[in-house]
Image (cartoon, rainbow, N blue to C red):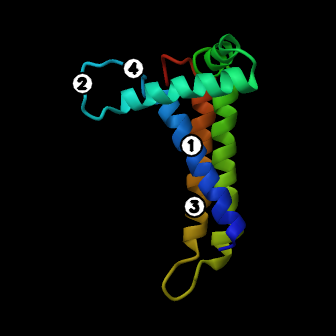
Amino acid sequence: VSSNLIVLSLMYGIVTIWILIRLFVEPSITKESEAFDIRRVCGRLEMIERKIVGKLFLGSEERYERIKNYVFVEANPLIQIFYLLLMSGGYGLVLYDIYPRLPCGKYLSEDHKYWGILSFALCLGSFVKACVSNPGAFH
């Protein structure tokens, strides 16, 4: 595996973990518990993020809050586009680097490649179905 693919995979992983934390962990900064709490850590990270990104790169914390609200709260296609880039980029790496190396023959059937393509197509199909469905209903 080339070093470029490893670096690209690590970058994808780091960005994905950061986005998942930002999406699913509700930050809180309270002094109720001194024990380790991921919400407190995320709250501190959000304060640091707001100060660094807001003041240094965007000019004000209010502009940062508006952008954050648009990306993470309001309905917009950014997360869908990001997910699609991750899915297609990841599967593109599989097609480019892993499929040519699969030792099909004695121990592994050629069907594994076709099942992988079918699995990716089903994931994309469910993604499209989720994108065009009503958020409260998946029929």
**Residue 16 badge:** 1
The residue labelled by disc 4 is: 28
At label 4, the amino acid type is Ser
Q: Quadrant of residue 66?
A: top right
Element class at badge 1: helix
Disc 2/disc 1 C-alpha distance (Å):
29 Å
Which secondary structure lies at badge 4? loop
Q: Badge 4 local density, few (<14 within 10 Å), some, or many (20+)?
A: some
Residue at the spot 72% in from the left edge and 65% down from the top edge: 4
In front: label 3 or label 4: 4
The residue closer to the viewer here, 85 or 44, is 44
Q: Which residue is mark 2?
A: 33
Q: Earlier in the sequence, mark 2 or mark 1?
A: 1
Callout 2: helix, strand or loop? loop
Residue 85 in picture, x, y percent from top left: 69, 43
The mark tally for this picture is: 4
Q: What is the distance, in whole Å, between disc 4 and disc 2 at their CAs?
A: 11 Å
Judged by depth in the image, the label closer to the viewer, 3 or 1, is 1
Q: Residue at x 63, y 30 (%)?
A: 79
Find residue 116 and name its label: 3
Mark 2 or mark 3: name the one nearer the start of the chain.
2
